Amino acid sequence: MRMKVGSTITLSVITEKDKPPQELKITLEERPRRANLAKRFYADDLGFSVREIVFEDTYSRKQPADLKGVVIAMINRKAPPPTPSWRATIWPRN
């Protein structure tokens, strides 16, 4: 049985032996975006692609759910190396 996002359901949860179940009301939300649906960017000149961080990434790595950033999704080993004038820059985040 499928239920719509925003529906409220009631669950009965038994927390301890010989105690009555507790009723929990839960509102259903949309499932977090998966890695295959994440926004992507391919840097042809640098030879790699990145995608946005999704919930699965933060959960599996025990990071805060609101972590911002990107994940390197693919590295093209046949891409030319960066030019000598290319420098990696790290920008501070506020």
Image: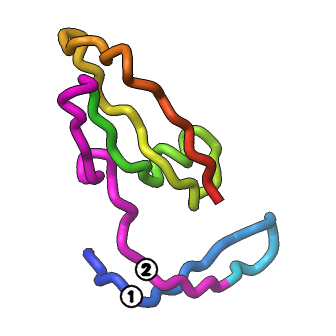
Mark 2 vs 1: CB contact within 8 A: yes
Drawn side of residue 52 relative to residue 14, left or right: left
Q: Quadrant of the N terminus?
A: bottom left
Residue type at tag 2: Leu
Density class for disc 2 (Cα within 10 Å; few <14, some 14-19, many ≥20) is few
The percent coordinates of residue 71 (x first, y second) are 41, 38
Drawn side of residue 58 relative to residue 5, left or right: right
Residue 36, placed above or below residue 21: above
Drawn side of residue 85 relative to residue 46, left or right: right
Q: Quadrant of the C terminus?
A: bottom right
The percent coordinates of residue 92 (x first, y second) are 62, 48
Q: Which residue is mark 1?
A: 6
SS at circle 1: loop
Residue type at tag 1: Gly
Q: Quadrant of residue 18?
A: bottom right
Residue 63, placed above or below residue 61: below
Q: Is residue 32 magenta?
A: yes
Q: Which residues lie in the magenta part?
A: 23-47
Given residues 91 and 16, the one toward you in this image is 91
At a point 34% along the width and 59% down the height, the residue shown is 33
Drawn side of residue 17 relative to residue 78, left or right: right
Mark sitting on residue 23: none
Q: Which residue is mark 2?
A: 28
Residue 26, placed above or below residue 31: below
Q: Is residue 94 magenta?
A: no
Dot 2 or dot 1, earlier in sequence: 1
